[in-house]
Amino acid sequence: MATRPSDFANDAGSQFLTDSFQRGLAHWNRERLEPGFPSHDWSRIFERDIKMQRLEGAFLEELRAEVADEAAAAPTDVEGFIAWFEGLKERGPGQGDPLFPWLAEEANRDELRWFFEQEAAGEAGFDDLVAMTQVKLPVRPKLELARNYWDEMGHGTAKGMHGPMLDALVETLAVEPVIEKTVWESLSLANAMTAMATNRRYAWHSVGALGVVELTAPGRSALVAEGLKRVGLTPKEARYFTLHAVLDVKHSEDWNREAIRPAVEEDPRRATAMAEGALIRLKCGARCFEAYRARLWG
């Protein structure tokens, strides 16, 4: 895939916030993370991956530049940073978006299906992101990510795993979550989360990004669950969203106490990295909500 950043420039000047780049990056992520086997053309694939990693890095640096000033203003002392971080639930980008009350109260089944199709196609796999992020972390943060991962894995039972719950809802709603049918804003969100989790220079960014998902997801999940049940889904069929509306509240409390707090106590520089990661995640999410509203309300 011989591509250059200039191949993707849009009218706003971004080299990466474009349909063609995000689709290409999404396909590459799917391919490179899929378990495979040794290949005789591994050298060619390796050269391709180097080019794509360079583009991925530039994409993430563009997202960092977008939030750098706001993140730099975040406190780096423990108590100050925890308060700032938890405040993102109310004042962070995309919070209180009118899309979600509308999904709960007005959207019809087809509109909810389209929304869920976008979300499912753009799902990077929270369990895998946590697993990749925890590599070589200090003990307390690593243990908290391990506990979070174990919850995602249903405590070792297939029926309790969150991923298959999502897959079951895909079948119930009869949607086809594929890259080709997904708006680039949703792909960009998944690509950004994957980039932070798979590149160790952004490990603390990923801790912040994953933590802010746990912090902000419960309210949105509850509203989506309301909408799904309103159009006829049973509580069991809507379980994926109902579960996250409740479980993620505790996950957020634990994550902030056991992952973020000790990380900042040990090295205050991590606060700025986690702030950047959280804001990147929220801004990508806000772009998704705007794109969804434009499609659903336009």
Image (spheres, rainbow, N blue to C red):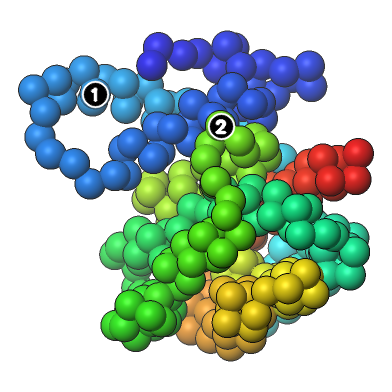
Residue 3 vertical position relative to residue 188 in the rendered view, above or below: above
Residue 264 vertical position relative to residue 243 in the rendered view, above or below: above
Relative depth, front residue between 224 and 234: 234
Q: Looking at the image, can residue 270 be seen?
A: no
The residues bearing labels 1 and 2 have C-alpha atoms spaced at a distance of 23 Å
Specify the amino acid type for callout 1. Ile
Kindly identify which numbered label has been placed on residue 45. 1
Q: Position of residue 281 (x, y in %)?
A: 64, 54
Q: Position of residue 229 (x, y in %)?
A: 73, 76
Question: Is residue 264 toward the left or the right of residue 65 in the image?
Answer: left
Using the rendered view, name the quadrant where residue 23 is placed.
top right
Instruction: Rate crowding at label 1 as few (under 14), some (14 to 19) or many (20 or more) other CA atoms within 10 Å.
Output: some
**Which quadrant, please, contains the C terminus?**
top right
Question: Is residue 36 toward the left or the right of residue 118 in the image?
Answer: left
Using the rendered view, name the quadrant where residue 79 is placed.
bottom right
Q: Looking at the image, can residue 259 be seen?
A: yes
Q: Contact (CB < 8 A) between labels 1 and 2?
A: no
Marked residue nearer the N-terminal end (1 or 2): 1
1 vs 2, front mark:
2
Residue of label 2: 180
Instruction: Rate crowding at label 2 as few (under 14), some (14 to 19) or many (20 or more) other CA atoms within 10 Å.
Output: few
Residue 220 vertical position relative to residue 7 in the rendered view, above or below: below
Specify the amino acid type for callout 2. Glu
